[in-house]
Image: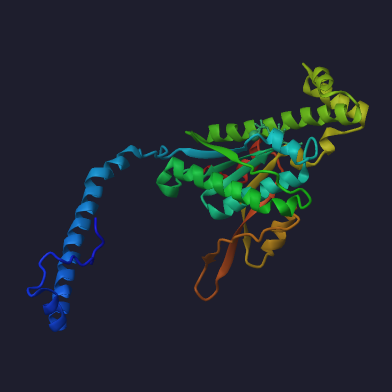
Amino acid sequence: MPLPGVVRTHRTPPRGGLAQIRSQPLKIITYVARLDKRAIQADLEGLRLAISMAGSRFAYVRNFELPDPLLPETYMVLRIDGHAFHRLSADHDFAKPNDERALQLMDHAARDVMNEFKDIVLAFGESDEYSFLFRKSTALYNRREAKILSTITSLFTSSYVFNWPKYLPNTPLKYCPSFDGRIILYPSPTIVRDYFSWRQADTHINNLYNTVFWALVLQGGQTTTEAHATLRSTVSSTKHEILFSQYGINYNDLPARYRKGSVLVRTEVNGEADANATDAQSLESPSPIPPTATEVSQGSKKKKERIRTIVELLHCDIIGDDFWNARQNLLAD
Ligand SMILES: Nc1nc2c(ncn2[C@@H]2O[C@H](COP(=O)(O)OP(=O)(O)O)[C@@H](O)[C@H]2O)c(=O)[nH]1
Ligand SMILES: [Mg+2]
């Protein structure tokens, strides 16, 4: 299609030919101007036609974009997991069995997600994974699954990469880490609790196994194959015994972060409290992130008390009742 405004000459040339043009330049300019306007109108018509064709002929492709709403009134848990972190941890010399710096980096990325998405009420992390619980009635992105999942997984990943140098300053990233993500819906508070119990039990089982395994290899001089064979079919108490009697390690003295994983919850602090200090201490981070505070005005207009909500990092038991009883809001509507 010609560009709007292109002047089409020779369609109705001025009578008198070139001589006329030379003798009456003003008239010719008027003629050209008129011709120009007609061309613009014609081209605009063509453009309108093309646009309406795009609307009618091509727009049907949108019908292939199917809605993907998550069931309302259900608890939503989003879990991300590092892709091929067995390899990534080896390629970047993570300490075995637990790399404090790498775990702190995971906590940092999870905190960034919680600071951005206020409908997340709880997060739990271990190893290369993090689970996020949304409040039951969340209407985030109209509960569109792909939108929620892709946005949060990508925010977590970009925070992980962005903050990597703060936690592992002497270990340049060799390639791009990535995380997969899934959303699981749970119909009842009991199942939500069981989900988080499952993840924390997994943390304990893995950590106990990995701690003994690497003691056998790094201190005991066994090959990895031998260490696996040593541990095959052993129960928990035997692993504790090997650790204590052969390596002088009391499992319960290991850092709570390794044994219990990381728990992120929102905690209210009043305006007088030093929210940053609380946050920094709990984060145990080399460069703590200032918390994004949700400020709520309370009381009369004259005297406003500020309630701030900070994301607090804990390494506590979440299988028993105490944690949940103290935070009834987590499973409320
Ligand atoms: N050395 C070390 N490895 C870790 C640490 N955290 C995670 N990993 C590795 O990451 C893996 C995570 O498990 P999984 O997701 O099943 O494996 P993936 O499929 O390779 O990501 C573990 O098996 C470890 O190899 C850590 O702190 N130190
Ligand atoms: Mg993984």
Residue 112 vertical position relative to residue 207 in the rendered view, above or below: below
Residue plotted at (72% across, 44% down) = 103
Q: In this view, does 258 lie above or below 4?
A: above
Is 158 in front, or is 34?
A: 34
Q: Position of residue 135 (x, y in %)?
A: 50, 45
Instruction: Kindly identify the residue that appears in the image at 92 percent across and 26 percent down.
Output: 246
Horizontal relation, residue 38 to residue 292: left or right: left
Determine whether, in the image, residue 86 is placed left or right of residue 24: right
- Seen in the picture, residue 203 relative to 1 is either above or below; the reply is above
Query: In the rendered view, does 295 fall on the left or right side of 88?
Result: left
- Say whether residue 333 is visible: no
Which colour scheme appears in the figure? Answer: rainbow
Q: Can residue 219 be seen in this view?
A: yes
Residue 316 in picture, x, y percent from top left: 71, 42
**Which residue is outermost to the left?**
15
Residue at left offset 55%, top offset 74%: 303
Q: Where is residue 181 in the image (x, y as percent from the top left)?
A: 55, 38
Number of dots carrying numbers: 0
Q: Quadrant of the N terminus?
A: bottom left
Quadrant of residue 245 in the image?
top right
Q: Position of residue 5 (x, y in %)?
A: 23, 67
Q: Quadrant of ligand 1?
A: top right
Near-viewer residue (12 or 320)? 12
* Residue at the spot 51% in from the left edge and 47% down from the top edge: 151
Q: Which residue lies furthest to the front in this view?
A: 19
